[in-house]
Image: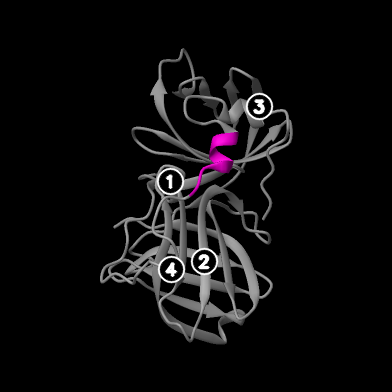
């Protein structure tokens, strides 16, 4: 699951109001340090950029210069994810097609074609594929779902308590564990979690960035990195709203 933002467009996507690449990459995640973080009694509120925002599907876009972008079209906004972060654009007036804008960053599309522009550059994009968003009806009680391949694994964060269920090695191992939030960056869409049990350590990181399943190519709005038992697993995921 690779999402690349070429040198041509890195400043183009991220040099708009509060979207500077340098700021996004260097900004620390706000929150308690791992040494002081405690397990809470209720599940945390995850950053909104990990969620589809009311959209019914995620779309993958292949762009020139070479890019991989993900979008989710809601009723009042467009959510767009690149390799370096997520953005929320409001509808704008346009003669034909649909246009969304935040500062100098704009997204125009008509049918399966789109143009992404900022003060520093332009991307010409074509729709690649779409994936329906996961819903609570499909995954009851789940606030966030992540998954990866080789070996197949997935993780579900409960919506009410700070617990997650790990299913590893193609479903042959399953365990439910408490977690604590060690860091949170709501604006940047990033969360760091750690085990709530000293004798069962793990770490997990969720980041609002364009992600593509490395087997199916399906688009997701978040990257998931799980470290457990001395191994690191990487995959994609999405928040699931009630």
Q: Marks 2/4: CA distance?
A: 16 Å
Q: What secondary structure is marked by label 4? A: loop
Above or below, 165 relative to 43: below
Residue at image location 59% in from the left, 35% down from the top: 22
Q: What secondary structure is marked by label 2? A: strand
Marks 4 and 3: CB-CB under 8 Å? no
Marks 1 and 4: CB-CB under 8 Å? no
Is 242 in the magenta? no
Mark 3 or 2: in front is 2
Q: Marks 4/3: CA distance?
A: 44 Å
In the picture of the structure, the residue carrying the numbered disc 3 is 123
Q: What secondary structure is marked by label 1? A: helix
Residue at image location 42% in from the left, 50% down from the top: 30
Magenta span covers which residues?
22-28
Q: Which mark is residue 49?
A: 1
Mark 1 or 4: in front is 4
Residue at image location 54% in from the left, 39% down from the top: 24
Mark 4 or 3: in front is 4
What colouring method underlies this structural image? one colour
Near-viewer residue (1 or 29): 29
Tell which circle, 2 or 4, labels the residue nearer the N-terminal end: 4
In the picture of the structure, the residue carrying the numbered disc 2 is 204
- Residue 197 percent coordinates (x, y): 42, 82
Task: Spot the residue most to the front.
Answer: 35
* Left or right side of 39 for 211: right
Marks 1 and 3: CB-CB under 8 Å? no
Tell which circle, 3 or 2, labels the residue nearer the N-terminal end: 3
SS majority, magenta: helix
């Amino acid at each position: 699951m690779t999402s690349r933002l070429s040198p041509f467009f890195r400043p183009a996507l991220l040099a708009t109001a509060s979207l500077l690449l340098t700021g996004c990459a260097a900004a620390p995640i706000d929150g308690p340090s791992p040494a002081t973080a405690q397990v809470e009694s209720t599940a945390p509120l995850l950053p909104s950029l990990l969620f589809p925002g009311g959209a019914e599907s995620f779309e993958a876009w292949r762009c020139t210069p070479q890019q991989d972008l993900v979008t989710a079209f809601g009723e009042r906004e467009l959510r767009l994810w690149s390799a370096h972060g997520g953005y929320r654009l409001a509808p704008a007036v346009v003669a034909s097609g649909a246009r969304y804008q935040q500062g100098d960053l704009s997204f125009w599309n008509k049918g399966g074609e789109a143009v992404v522009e900022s003060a520093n550059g332009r991307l010409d994009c074509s729709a690649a594929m779409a994936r329906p968003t996961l819903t609570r009806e499909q995954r009851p009680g789940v606030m966030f779902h992540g998954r990866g391949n080789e070996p197949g694994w997935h993780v579900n964060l409960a919506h009410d308590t700070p617990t997650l269920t790990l299913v590893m090695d193609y479903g042959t191992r399953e365990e439910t564990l408490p977690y604590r939030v060690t860091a949170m960056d709501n604006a940047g869409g990033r969360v760091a979690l750690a085990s709530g049990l000293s004798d069962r350590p793990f770490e997990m990181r969720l980041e609002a960035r364009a992600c593509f399943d490395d087997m199916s190519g399906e688009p997701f709005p978040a990257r998931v990195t799980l470290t457990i038992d001395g191994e690191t697993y990487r995959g994609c995921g999405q928040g699931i709203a009630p």
